[in-house]
Image: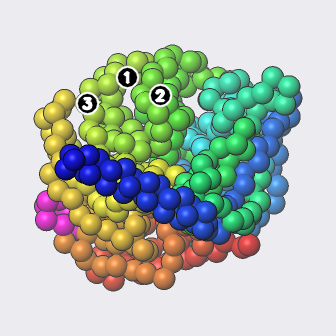
Amino acid sequence: MKHKSHISLAFLLLALGAFLSGCLRDECETTRTYIRFDPVYKLPAEVRVGISAQGPSELRNPGKIYVLGHYLFINERNEGIHVLDNSDPANPKKIAFWNIPGNGDMAIRGQYLYANQYVDLLTIDISDLQNPQIVCRSESAFQPYGFDPQQGYIVDYVQTEITETISCEDARWGQQWFWSSDVLFMSADVVSSFESNGIKNSSPLAAAGIGGSYARFTIVDQYLYTIDNSLLRSWSVASACPARLDSTWVGWNIETIFPWKDKLFIGSQTGVFIFNNSNPQRPVLEAQFSHATGCDPVVCDDKYAYVTIHDGTTCNGTFNQLDIIGIDNLPSTELLKVYQMKRPFGLAVTNNFLYLCDDGLKIFDKTDPLDLKEKSHTTGFDAYDVIALSDSQLLLIGADGFYQFDASDPEKPKQLSLIPVVK
């Protein structure tokens, strides 16, 4: 009888739990605001359109930056490229806006600009800055967001805010984002955080330019390397039209590429991939370092790779840190130091200093990378990437504009100029 009473009590407790759980579910609901992303399709004929040069235009939604000699190139996300003369960093002058629909990435060698137009790679002759001309189009060079045989390529998403009450029995309960057919729904908080990330003149053009830490295109000698969400591609640019050489699967969610000597460092949401580029036609994976989930760019010097990880995006990460990774004994890599940050983004290094976009601009003495010394922290602006042309000239791009600083005195960097974003 005693054994039976225990069983009865167990069933009673289970029944009571189920009853209470049912009551709680009946009364459990919350109001959530989502952003609905409806896909925008374009047919191949609509994707493969021409380009044009226009007069100077305002920055409205800037993306990546690129430097070539005393010229600056600032991407206007999905629209084209702003061209500026930066002979005087205190007074940069807008020259033109190149209308390149679907553009987000770029690299330059000699007189040729290599830029994506949606899924295609364009080679553009920019010897006349006021009259750029398409020389070659390499079709389907990159993976699209999606493709429908009737509607074409997915090239963008239109956002609509939706507020609704959700029961805890709803499959969407607690989810920050979810798909319904080809429509993406994302929590408004996540979208807000994600968007805050947000990279003919008589003077001769230099051999090759310099990109930021969020670059997805880079040029080494006569080779162009591009990445999309999962693939590393190599191209010969010895002649005007790029020749496809190799395509290597790296992994899902790769984001950035940084060249260093005979290595290519590729940042992803889960780690860093290091490719040996001794044979520039076919880079091979030499080493890999896995880190906490989060969006990251990577830069390096001879002994160390510097990686930032930040949260608040579709990367699903919760960490905000700067990782110092030992790379002087490849293929072995080692996490040597972690510095906690507020929410770091792009970065750059010189022989002596580390420049970091984290709540503005932070400058560190990196004489000993395992004991970084913060020299200054300049706030009041939103920067997500930086190019250090030297220890004295910094270029920063952010959601509120393009900044230039004189960092000759790292303890007191001086703002030289600002080209603001106009909404």
- Judging by the rendered image, the residue that carries numbered circle 3 is 287
State which region is magenta.
365-372
**Residue 211 x/y as whole percent:** 48, 49
Give the vertical position of 146 relative to 100 (above or below): above
Q: Give me the residue at 81% from left, 23% from top.
A: 149
Crowding at mark 1 (Cα within 10 Å: few <14, some 14-19, many 20+): many
Residue 283: mark in rendering: 1
State yes or no: discs 2 and 3 in contact (Cβ < 8 Å): no
Crowding at mark 2 (Cα within 10 Å: few <14, some 14-19, many 20+): many
Residue 421 position by quadrant: bottom right
Which callout, 3 or 1, points to the residue nearer the camera? 3
Give how far apart the Cα atoms at labels 3 and 1 are: 12 Å
Q: Secondary structure at mark 1?
A: loop
Residue 136 position by quadrant: top right
Residue 232: mark in rendering: 2
Task: Give amino acid for label 3.
Answer: Ala
Q: Give me the residue at 22% from left, 47% from top.
A: 1
What colouring style does the render use? rainbow
Question: In this figure, what is the number of numbered marks?
Answer: 3
Left or right, residue 408 beside residue 70: left
Residues 117 and 146: in front is: 146
Residue 303 shows in the view? no
State yes or no: discs 3 and 1 in contact (Cβ < 8 Å): no
State yes or no: discs 2 and 1 in contact (Cβ < 8 Å): yes
Residue 217: mark in rendering: none
Left or right, residue 109 beside residue 104: left
Q: Give me the residue at 33% from left, 41% from top.
A: 271
Residues 324 and 389: in front is: 324
Give how far apart the Cα atoms at labels 2 and 1 are: 9 Å
**Residue 326 x/y as whole percent:** 17, 45
